[in-house]
Image (cartoon, rainbow, N blue to C red):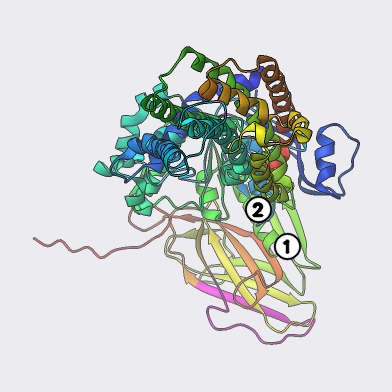
């Protein structure tokens, strides 16, 4: 049995010709709503215990509506949500705090709002006080708190009892760096004990780092549900989506999923990595001089061509990326049929492992404005350590050692 | 219905702490703190007693006591404040708590219960002050005061029924929130609280039967001022009407609850 199952969920906001029609509808009168605005429809997925799922999507995609339906503050118009366990949401820290009351009193109140009895809070209160680490302020009125202290108390209550599902808004600020680490440590502990995480974020890196699955929402529907890297690549392409643009997803020979998108004014013909002798390579030694060669063909007249690339590690985290705009060598107006080759030569200061390269052709400084072509996993290569000293990590930063006595 | 009561019981800690916090927040940072809960109603009652009896020398026909009019007035006010407080607080309740309802999941039925709890507590302090002042004015408490329990209940269900319905409607039609305070004011003057019953011309007295607050206020006055048994039959009718209104209110509440958060 799934921990959370969402079945054909839909939410519509109804508008009636007059509000009296709405009232009449409660009493069973056969009135039709004048308009129904579906913000979420046909959403289905199931989450198993222990999963960490990222929920991504642009503003207005329906993320918060979905979360409200899952937590139960909103009622579904159609479909159903089944939850086997308690949900805690760290979305609105400090909701319902009364500033005239002390931190301790607010803790009792907030925990009561979450459905805990006074006796249960009595048992947890010393632990909450210890976690918040605000010293004597715990018994002072909340109005004397700094915003950071308020967040500390709020987080301590919100996570005082381990939930089966924890919803975290990644953009949430939990105060200073020290406390942030403490919060993430607690979230990590919960996860080890079997709590399922549902993380809302725009940030590719944290989704890749924290989640083992991602769900992409767009215009109230589930667009993709799968591995975080694949979904985030698709999301990236979606952001660049403009009129006439296409998003193509293909499965490569090794089973990974490649996403291509763009309006097609310029196309990537070939991408290859060459060593110092000009030979194409797939395996690179640490510190070797290599050259990334990209051949481009222009299909329609364009004012500007910028070529960018990102080297990503095996988890999809970007290691290094730049583009010709930042390197001050963007290309001027170009005509159909023109070809242009780019060579990016660098020293492979990378750690041992597998890397991929994503290439983008666009105008101006990012692919958001005009995106001719974006290709993830355009190239995959490995880095091996043949002659360098032993080291760990994804970057090769050889130091000079001095030993001073 | 059973589920409603069950969730209320589960959230009893929240209800209690909400009521407590409301009072704590009201008197926070004041020296006398909770004492104000007694001082306010005491002052109110004492001022009425003093001004009306000594300065205006108002008399109530039928009772030979210079404080009788003041007592009459206070008895009516005791009933009316409970009624008006519950109705007007329920009216804006869901709108005021909109942010909380949108962000947190908790049984919404706790909200009106918190209002009832704190209104009852306020009313209790007013009653205590009233009994104290009456005793000082030569009217010691008597057994008839036990009638105040069913009286308070009647007043409560009537107020809660009306308040719940209006509070729900107000979420969707905000004009309700503007119109109700005016109606409450008119209603106050259409109920014999300030003036005795006999100032109303005979021809219009029949209209009072349409006013559900009339039997309640009259019963308060019977018990507290005249020291006689109230009209139990009339009270029973009002209580039944109140319960019926409450049932309608709860029904609407259940139907409206899913849409309420959408509209807030």
Which residue is most to the left?
Answer: A405
Question: Is residue B62 among what the camera can see?
Answer: yes
Corner quadrant of residue A273: bottom right
Element class at badge 1: strand
The circle drawn on residue A363 is none
Question: In this figure, which residue is indicated by the disc labeled 2?
Answer: A57
Count of numbered tags = 2
* Residue A51 pos. (x, y %): 56, 35
- Residue A85 vertical placement versus A282 (above, below): above
Question: In this figure, which residue is indicated by the disc labeled 1?
Answer: A261
Q: Residues within 10 Å of mark 1 (few under 14, many from 20)?
A: many
The answer to whether residue A56 is left or right of residue A397 is right
Where, quadrant-wise, is the N terminus of chain A in this rendering? top right
* Separation of residues labelled 2 and 1 (CA atoms): 17 Å
Residue at the (69%, 17%) spot, across then down: B236
Q: Mark 2 and mark 1 in contact? Answer it, CB < 8 Å.
A: no
**Segment tinted magenta in the rendering:** A322-345
Corner quadrant of residue A233: bottom right
Q: Looking at this view, is B234 or A349 the one in front?
A: B234
């Amino acid at each position: 049995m799934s921990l959370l199952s969402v079945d054909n969920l839909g939410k519509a906001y109804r508008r009636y010709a007059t509000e009296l029609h709405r009232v009449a509808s409660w009493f069973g009168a056969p009135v039709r709503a004048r308009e129904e605005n579906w913000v979420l429809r046909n959403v289905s997925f199931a989450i198993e215990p222990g999963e960490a799922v990222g929920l991504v999507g642009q503003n207005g995609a329906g993320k918060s509506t979905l979360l409200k339906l899952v937590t139960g503050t909103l009622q579904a118009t159609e479909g159903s949500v089944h939850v086997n366990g308690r949900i805690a949401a760290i979305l609105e820290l400090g909701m319902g705090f009364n500033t005239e009351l002390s931190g301790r009193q607010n803790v009792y109140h907030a925990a009561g709002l979450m459905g805990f009895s006074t006796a249960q809070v009595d048992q947890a209160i010393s632990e909450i006080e210890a976690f918040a680490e605000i010293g004597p302020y715990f018994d002072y009125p909340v109005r004397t708190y700094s915003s950071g202290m308020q967040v500390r108390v709020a987080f301590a209550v919100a996570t005082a009892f381990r939930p089966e599902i924890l919803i975290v808004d990644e953009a949430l600020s939990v105060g200073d760096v020290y406390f942030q680490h403490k919060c993430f440590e607690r979230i990590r502990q919960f996860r080890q004990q079997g709590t399922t995480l549902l993380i809302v974020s725009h940030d590719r890196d944290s989704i890749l780092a924290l989640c083992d699955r991602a769900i992409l929402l767009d215009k109230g529907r589930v667009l993709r549900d799968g591995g975080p890297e694949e979904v985030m690549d698709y999301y990236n392409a979606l952001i660049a989506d403009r009129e006439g643009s296409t998003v193509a997803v293909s499965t490569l020979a090794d089973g990974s999923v490649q996403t291509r998108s763009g309006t097609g004014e310029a196309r990537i013909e070939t991408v290859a990595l060459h060593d110092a002798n000009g030979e194409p390579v797939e395996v690179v030694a640490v510190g070797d001089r290599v050259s990334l060669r990209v051949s481009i063909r222009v299909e329609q007249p364009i004012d500007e061509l910028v070529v960018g690339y990102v080297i990503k590690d095996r988890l999809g985290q970007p290691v290094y990326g730049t583009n010709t705009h930042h390197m001050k060598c963007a290309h001027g107006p170009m005509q159909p049929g023109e070809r242009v080759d780019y060579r990016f030569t660098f020293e492979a200061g990378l750690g041992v492992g597998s890397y991929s390269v994503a290439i983008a052709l666009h105008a101006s400084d990012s692919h958001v404005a005009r995106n001719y072509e974006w290709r993830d996993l355009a190239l995959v290569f490995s880095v091996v350590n043949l002659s360098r000293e032993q080291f760990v990590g994804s970057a090769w930063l050889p130091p000079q050692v001095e030993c001073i006595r | 219905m059973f589920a409603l009561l069950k969730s209320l019981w589960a959230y009893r800690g929240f209800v209690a702490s909400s009521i407590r916090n409301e009072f704590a927040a009201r008197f926070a940072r004041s020296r006398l703190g909770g004492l104000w809960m007694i001082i306010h109603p005491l002052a109110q009652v004492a001022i009425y007693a003093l001004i009306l009896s000594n300065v205006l020398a108002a008399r109530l026909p039928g009772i030979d006591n210079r404080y009788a009019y003041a007592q009459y007035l206070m008895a009516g006010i005791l009933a009316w404040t409970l009624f008006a407080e519950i109705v007007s607080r329920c009216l804006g309740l869901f709108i005021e708590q909109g942010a909380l309802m949108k962000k947190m999941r908790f049984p919404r039925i706790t909200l009106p219960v918190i209002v009832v709890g704190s209104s009852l507590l306020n009313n209790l302090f007013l009653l205590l002050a009233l009994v104290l002042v009456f005793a000082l004015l030569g009217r010691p408490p008597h057994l008839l005061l036990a009638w105040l329990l069913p009286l308070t209940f009647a007043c409560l269900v009537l107020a809660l029924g009306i308040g719940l319905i209006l509070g729900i409607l107000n979420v969707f039609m905000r004009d309700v929130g503007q119109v109700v305070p005016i109606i409450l004011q008119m209603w106050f003057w259409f109920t014999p609280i300030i003036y005795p019953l006999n100032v109303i011309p005979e021809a219009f007295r029949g209209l009072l039967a349409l006013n559900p607050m009339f039997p309640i206020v009259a019963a308060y006055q019977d018990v507290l001022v005249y020291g006689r048994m109230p009209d139990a039959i009339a009270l029973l009718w009002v209580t039944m009407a109140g319960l019926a209104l409450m049932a309608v209110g709860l029904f609407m509440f259940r139907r409206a609850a899913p849409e309420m958060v959408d509209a807030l």
